[in-house]
Amino acid sequence: MKDYKSECITNKNTPNITEGSYILKRQNGLWKLTNTGAFDDKNWNESIKDYQIFIDKNGWYTSSGAGITKICNSFKRTECKTPFSREIKIKPSNDDNYLEVTAIVRWRDANPHKVTLKQTLSNWKSNYDNSGN
């Protein structure tokens, strides 16, 4: 993998990736995690603003939507805000080679809805870095 940095998965050498809630922003063609407070289900209307999902001019889903006010619909599919929010929760494990990542997508129509996906990411390259080959 080009420009792979094995320390990106660990919490030992990367103080920027700590346990907490994040939003995923697209900036200059790159994805960036931005730390923020946890979504407050009791204060839905305020929390949704912090985690709002937008579609940018290239059709990418992102949390970066400064100045975008139009609602996405069948006619407006770019540069619009969706009814969805996305929270990324990261929890380092005791082993520096693993991170537990949970993505939570929320939306509301007549009732609030939530879909959660949890995955453990591993630093698979560490097996090769430490093998002496």
Image (spheres, rainbow, N blue to C red):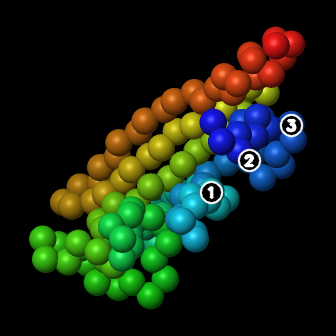
- The N terminus: image quadrant: top right
| Residue under numbered circle 2 | 17
Question: Which residue: 35% across, 46% down?
Answer: 114
Measure the alpha-carbon separation of dots 1 and 2. Answer: 9 Å
Residue 85 coordinates in the image, percent (x, y): 40, 60
| Residue under numbered circle 3 | 12
Question: Which residue: 61% across, 51% down?
Answer: 21
Q: Quadrant of residue 12?
A: top right
Q: Which of the marked residues, 1 or 2, is nearer the chain's N terminus? A: 2
Q: Of the numbered discs in the image, which one, if any, rests on residue 33?
A: 1
Give amino acid for label 3. Lys
Q: Quadrant of residue 92?
A: top right
Asked whether the beta carbons under mark 3 and mark 1 sit within 8 Å of each other, the answer is: no
Give amino acid for label 1. Leu
Q: Nearer the viewer, residue 34 or 83?
A: 34
Query: For mark 1, does the 10 Å Cα neighbourhood hold few (<14), some (14 to 19), or many (20 or more) residues?
Result: some
- The C terminus: image quadrant: top right
Asked whether the beta carbons under mark 3 and mark 2 sit within 8 Å of each other, the answer is: no
Visible residue check, residue 98: no
Considering only vertical position in the picture, is 76 above or below 41?
below
Residue 91 coordinates in the image, percent (x, y): 67, 36
Considering only vertical position in the picture, is 75 above or below 35?
below
Measure the alpha-carbon separation of dots 3 and 1. Answer: 18 Å
Visible residue check, residue 105: yes
